[in-house]
Image: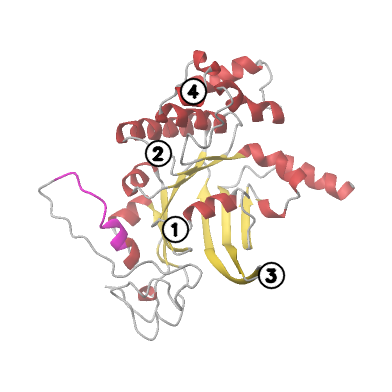
Amino acid sequence: MEAKQDRIDHISEMDTSSEYVLEVNDLKKYFPIKAGFFNRVVGHVKAVDGVSFKVKRGTTMGLVGESGCGKTTVGKTILRLNDKTDGEVLFNGIEIHSLPKKELRRIRPKIQIIFQDPYSSLSPRMPVDEIIGEAVKEHDLVPEGETYDEYIVRIMNSCGLQPYHRDRYPHEFSGGQRQRICIARALAMNPDFIVCDEPVSALDVSIQAQIINLLEDLQKEYGLTYLFISHDLSVVEHISDTVGVMYLGNMVEYADKVSIFSEPLHPYTVALFSAIPIPDPTVKMDRIILEGSIPSPANPPSGCKFHTRCNRCIEGLCDTEAPTMKEVRPGHYVACHLYDEKNTAK
């Protein structure tokens, strides 16, 4: 009993002085494939297969890659919406997946998520007041000196919502307003860290800019830290401080925004970034078209998972030996044999 109380006290005294609010070490998430009359496990989908990164406090890390590369699974596993298969997720120095559910509940308010679809993630039977305030009441998070009503109205104002919106239902709002409700719901928990899972992909371009600006303003006002998951590279370039690129469950490149967008190193990152549209019709874009399709995460290629589509594949090495993530420039990490000491990248 005393040991358990010590752990609870430890949670209430999280290490918020650390430079990094989140540290992910060799995170893996495999989903079982079952078949046959007895529903036996015959294989695994390796959705996340050894991902590591850190997110500095008060910054935004962008996570990009093709659909199905494991971006959303990373976000959900970090929040323990999925149980991990292996690895470590440290939030303010505490390993999230090692906590019993009762203790996890105590830090739930500090780690929130904004989902991609602002309509399906809101209950159609609840007014805005209850959507935003349900968890606030559950966790008793109304600040001292404020009433519940005052707190909800303040949060709504911060997210561009009006007090008279409190009694309305999600179907009465536009897509951009619904996403503001989702942001307000997360913000009301007074979080340190928010996973933004493609929060603007379902919105019109003009509304996207409003939501991005709102997220940036809230980050400055409340000192928030974001993991921004998106396939829209232009949005990621605008909002992120650091960027990680994923391919088939692995992180292939990680660096600060300026370094990775000005000079990407991994062949996959180069091909991915070549698809970013340039708003100048006089500029001829040199697109790199990858051959073949993405392999199945249930049966990934041997060696480097990208070697089947890479135009710089080294036969006898890339197809047999998986590369490790290495720092090739200060703060710029890449998992590619082209950057091994025995090879010279040109």
Q: Mark 3 or mark 2: which is in front?
A: 3
Q: Look at the numbered disc 1 and give the secondary structure of its residue.
A: loop
Between the residue at mark 1 and the residue at mark 2, the CA separation in whole angstroms equals 18 Å
Query: Looking at the picture, how far across and down is residue 100, in whole percent?
Result: 76, 50
Badge number at residue 158 = 4
- What residue occupies the far left of the structure in this picture? 282
- What residue occupies the far right of the structure in this picture? 1
Position of residue 140 relative to residue 49, above or below, is above
Is-magenta flag for residue 266?
A: no
The amino acid pointed to by label 2 is Val
Between the residue at mark 2 and the residue at mark 4, the CA separation in whole angstroms equals 18 Å
Q: Earlier in the sequence, mark 2 or mark 4?
A: 4
Q: Earlier in the sequence, mark 1 or mark 3?
A: 3
Between the residue at mark 3 and the residue at mark 2, the CA separation in whole angstroms equals 42 Å
The amino acid pointed to by label 3 is Phe
| Mark 3 burial class by Cα count in 10 Å: few <14, some 14-19, many 20+ | few
Q: Mark 2 or mark 4: which is in front?
A: 2
Badge number at residue 200 = 2
Query: Looking at the picture, how far across and down is residue 48, in whole percent?
Result: 53, 62
Query: Looking at the picture, how far across and down is residue 305, in whole percent?
Result: 43, 72
Q: Look at the numbered disc 2 and give the secondary structure of its residue.
A: loop
Residue designated by label 1: 68
| Mark 2 burial class by Cα count in 10 Å: few <14, some 14-19, many 20+ | many
- What residue occupies the far bottom of the structure in this picture? 316
Between the residue at mark 4 and the residue at mark 1, the CA separation in whole angstroms equals 34 Å
Q: Is residue 90 left or right of residue 207?
A: right
Q: Is residue 231 left or right of residue 6?
A: left
Residue designated by label 3: 38
